[in-house]
């Protein structure tokens, strides 16, 4: 077996960023010496060796790999991770400098094992970030199927449901009914369920915990104490129960929603806050690199259902007492937990809902 890596060299003499990231991933895994040859595609030079190889195989994006077997047959791999799983999985496993975990892929975990325990999540996020949201979602659903769930809450989540339906792959959907949603939000949930014919599993807060909080502090204690305690009971705890059944979940979060809280939101990671059916749960953020305008352009193009409250000036929508309309030029989360101070509520995230 002979492995050739085709890399792209820019006009300034440097390798393309994706090529450099891929080489670093292979070095980190202790696999770089398994690459027998590097062939360069030079930017702007159609006759450079790598460009010629790319045209021969119908590939126009670097890096990619060509594996030649003993009979002379050639197989092209656009994904370094797929190459590793197919041909390099028996190589010695290196220790990740980023995660402190083995980096070798684990395709056959034992019963109850975490399938992603040996995954290099930093490298995987770098690779998946080159795909569009539907491609990122496809990766998650092909890998996890009904072991993956989408959280339904707002406009971004319906975009992801719409994409998932178009992919035609198995998935689940859950939503949190905090007990204090506006009527429009319940109508929105029904509209999505009916439009797509998809089941949405509802999870509720623990009634005894809510009763005790209200008994001790009244129904609106968040106005004095801040929203974190109430959110922990009404939103976070039910989500923890929901996610314990799954190995991966899909969030509609975007980087530009909370620029101070999530300046470098990866498209995939092991979620630091939630536990799944086999240990740490994987979270996908397919829309991490989209903007609000891009989300709404998709909504208008595909005619997906929307919450009626958006037409009334609501941008971010949560519980009835905690959400209000905002001016169009204000941060989109400013309408959440607005009593906690101008701009403060926009970045405040209840425990378990952020990184």
Image: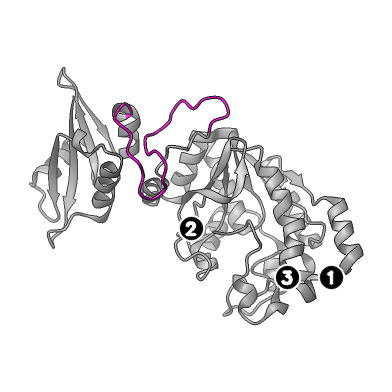
The span from disc 2 to disc 3 (Cα, nearest Å) is: 23 Å
Q: Given contact means CB atoms under 8 Å apart, are the residues at marks 1 and 3 in contact?
A: no
Residue 120: x and y, percent? 39, 43
Mark 1 neighbour class, 10 Å CA radius: few under 14, some 14 to 19, many 20 or more: some
Q: Earlier in the sequence, mark 2 or mark 3?
A: 2
According to the picture, the residue beneath numbered tag 2 turns out to be: 288
Dominant SS in magenta: loop
Is residue 26 inside the magenta stretch? no
Considering depth in this image, is 110 or 45 the residue closer to the camera? Answer: 110
According to the picture, the residue beneath numbered tag 1 turns out to be: 220
Residue 319: x and y, percent? 76, 64
The residue positioned 79% from the left and 63% from the top of the image is 182
Which is in the foreground here, disc 1 or disc 3? Answer: 1
Q: Which residues are magenta?
A: 89-113
Q: Earlier in the sequence, mark 1 or mark 2?
A: 1
Quadrant assignment for the C terminus = bottom right
The span from disc 1 to disc 2 (Cα, nearest Å) is: 33 Å
Residue 71's tag is none
What SS does tag 2 mark? loop
Residue furthest to the top in view is 71
| Left/right of residue 209 with respect to residue 280 in the rendered view | right
């Amino acid at each position: 077996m002979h492995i050739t890596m085709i890399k792209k060299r820019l006009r300034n003499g440097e390798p393309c960023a994706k090529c450099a990231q891929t080489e670093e991933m292979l070095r980190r895994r202790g696999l770089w010496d398994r690459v027998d040859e590097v062939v360069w595609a030079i930017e702007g030079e159609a006759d450079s060796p790598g460009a010629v190889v790319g045209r021969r195989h119908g590939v126009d994006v670097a890096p990619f790999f060509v594996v030649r077997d003993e009979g002379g047959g050639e197989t092209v791999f656009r994904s370094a991770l797929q190459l590793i799983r197919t041909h390099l999985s028996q190589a010695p496993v290196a220790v990740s400098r980023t995660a402190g975990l083995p980096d070798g892929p684990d395709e056959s975990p034992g019963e109850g094992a975490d399938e992603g325990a040996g995954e290099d999540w930093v490298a995987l996020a770098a690779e998946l970030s080159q795909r569009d949201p539907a491609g990122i979602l496809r990766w998650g659903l092909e890998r996890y199927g009904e072991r993956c769930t989408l959280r339904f809450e707002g406009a971004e989540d319906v975009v992801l449901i719409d994409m998932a339906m178009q992919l035609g792959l198995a998935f689940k959907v859950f939503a949190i009914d905090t007990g204090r949603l506006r009527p429009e939000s319940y109508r929105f949930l029904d509209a999505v369920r009916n439009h797509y014919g998809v089941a949405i599993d509802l999870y509720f807060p623990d009634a005894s915990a809510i009763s005790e909080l209200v008994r001790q502090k009244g129904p609106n204690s968040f106005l004095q104490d801040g929203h974190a305690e109430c959110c922990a009971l009404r939103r976070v705890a039910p989500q923890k129960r929901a996610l314990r059944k799954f190995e991966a979940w899909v969030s509609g979060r975007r980087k530009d929603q909370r620029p101070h809280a999530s300046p470098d939101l990866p498209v995939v990671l092991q979620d630091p806050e939630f536990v799944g059916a086999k240990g740490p749960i994987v979270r996908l953020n397919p829309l991490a690199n989209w903007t609000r305008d891009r989300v709404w352009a998709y909504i208008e193009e595909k005619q997906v259902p929307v919450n009626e409250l958006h037409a009334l000036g609501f941008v971010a929508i949560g519980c009835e007492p905690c959400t209000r309309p905002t001016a169009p030029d204000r941060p989109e989360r400013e309408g959440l937990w607005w009593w906690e101070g101008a701009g403060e509520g926009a970045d405040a995230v209840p425990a378990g809902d952020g990184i």
